[in-house]
Image (cartoon, grey):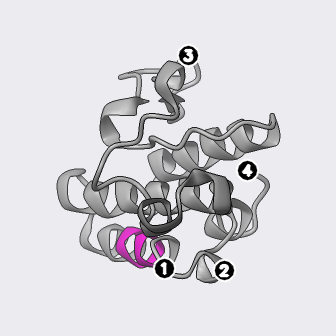
Amino acid sequence: MEIVAALLEVVHNIHSAGFVHLDIKPANIAVPLRTTNDTAAATMLDFGVARMVTEGWMAPEMKIEGIENIDIKAADVWSVGRVLLFMASFCPFDEEQKKLVRMLGRRMTSPDPDGRPSLAEASGNRPV
């Protein structure tokens, strides 16, 4: 579950710095095999083409309204939720962890941007 927290934290840090990614997908997330303090870490890649989104990983409102007319942070939250749903199928979580990751992923991929949790809410209201 540390990797989930690390992913939420890196996207929160991107947003806090005044940026959005808009192409969050597994191929754009780097996870080192080992960190210096043995904690999970995640790094977002591919900021150079952040305006070139990938079908299947972009929020539904981006397809309908375009990025100029949406809450782009909420679009990133949707994409993180989509990644979590992917991770729940392919990462070595135990059954209870898979259930929690899927529940969070479903909340984050709400079709209604206003129905998605913030990154702070998604991380259990812990500082991210």
Q: Which residue is pictured at 52% across the width and 19% down the height?
A: 48
Q: Regarding mark 3 in the picture, which secondary structure is present there? A: loop
Q: Are marks 1 and 3 in contact (CB under 8 Å)?
A: no
Q: Which residue is mark 3?
A: 36
Residue 17 in percent (x, y) is at: 81, 34
Q: CA distance from mark 1 to mark 4?
A: 21 Å
Q: Which of marks 3 and 1 precedes in the sequence?
A: 3
User: What is the magenta segment's predominant secondary structure?
Assistant: helix
Range of magenta residues: 101-106
Residue 93 in view in this figure: no
Q: Given the image, on which type of amino acid does mark 1 rest?
A: Ser
The answer to whether residue 49 is above or below residue 98 is above
Q: Given the image, on which type of amino acid does mark 3 rest?
A: Thr
- The verdict on residue 103 being magenta is yes
- The verdict on residue 12 being magenta is no
Frontmost residue, 57 versus 36:
57
- Residue 87 sits in quarter: bottom left
The answer to whether residue 43 is above or below residue 3 is above
Q: Which residue is mark 4?
A: 128
Q: Which of the two marks, 1 or 4, is nearer to us in this view? A: 1
Q: Which residue is mark 1?
A: 110
Q: Are marks 2 and 4 in contact (CB under 8 Å)?
A: no
Q: Which of the two marks, 4 or 3, is nearer to us in this view? A: 4
How many other residues sit within 10 Å of disc 2, few (<14), some (14-19) or many (≥20)?
A: few
Q: Are marks 2 and 3 in contact (CB under 8 Å)?
A: no
How many other residues sit within 10 Å of disc 3, few (<14), some (14-19) or many (≥20)?
A: few
Q: Which of the two marks, 2 or 3, is nearer to us in this view? A: 2
Q: Which of marks 4 and 2 precedes in the sequence?
A: 2
Q: Which residue is mark 2?
A: 114
